[in-house]
Amino acid sequence: MNTLKNTFLETERLILKVIDESYVEKVVDYWNKNKQFLNPWSPLVDDEFFTAYFQSSKLKDDIQRMKEGLMFKVWMIKKEDEKEEIIGSISLNNIVRGVFQSCHIGYQLSHNETNQGYMTEAVQRVIDYAFYDLKLHRIEANIMPINGASLKVVEKLGFESEGLAKKYLKINGKWEDHIHMVILNKEME
């Protein structure tokens, strides 16, 4: 099932856009501006990650995975920004159909856009898309206990904890515990 039903979603203040390699310079700019800020919450990457060559390949791969129905990814842009500067992204990964109808959500936001409600606004719109357009039953978020800002976002949106996963993901070179947060599509119960 192709997840590319829409190439963009809207919120009150944001455009959430599926992008291709024509946006590669904006993506590279985003990653380079936020390298230090996102480092504590990200897997280790080498310098090649921050190049146009690598990001172009990644964008092509993302589009292919969306066509295959395995993921859905949007990049966040403020509506009033004529330059279309990227301020973050949200992805639904590991989409599994059949009896599971579930995925994992991941998101990140530019360091200079935090504490303005953008992520809560955008994640809510992606949840709506996942439940009502993609017809998923369950969205899972795995968040490090020390990432209070991320936990606050999902708690506001109705995610509930299903427990602590020990040494769940290797983040910044170290296996980290994660709180397993879940929201269910009440329309499918």
Image (cartoon, rainbow, N blue to C red):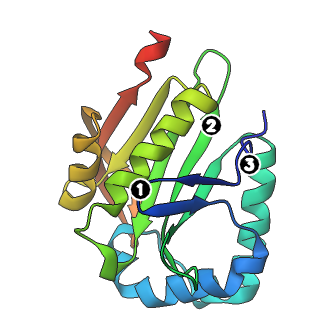
Mark 3 to mark 2 CA distance (whole Å) = 10 Å
Q: Residue at x 59, y 24 (%)?
A: 101
The answer to the question of whether label 1 and label 2 lie on touching residues, with beta carbons closer than 8 A, is: no
Q: Residues within 10 Å of mark 2 (few under 14, many from 20)?
A: many
Callout 2: helix, strand or loop? Answer: strand
Report helix, strand or loop for mark 1. Answer: loop
- Dividing the picture into quadrants, the one containing residue 181 is top left
Tag 1 residue: 12
Judging by the rendered image, the residue that carries numbered circle 2 is: 95
The disc labelled 1 sits on which kind of residue?
Glu
Q: Residues within 10 Å of mark 1 (few under 14, many from 20)?
A: few
At 28% from the left and 72% from the top, the residue drawn is: 114
In 3D space, how far apart are the residues under numbered discs 3 and 1 (Cα atoms)?
Answer: 25 Å
Q: Position of residue 53 (x, y in %)?
A: 76, 86
Q: Is residue 111 above or below residue 115?
A: below
Say which residue label 3 marks: 66
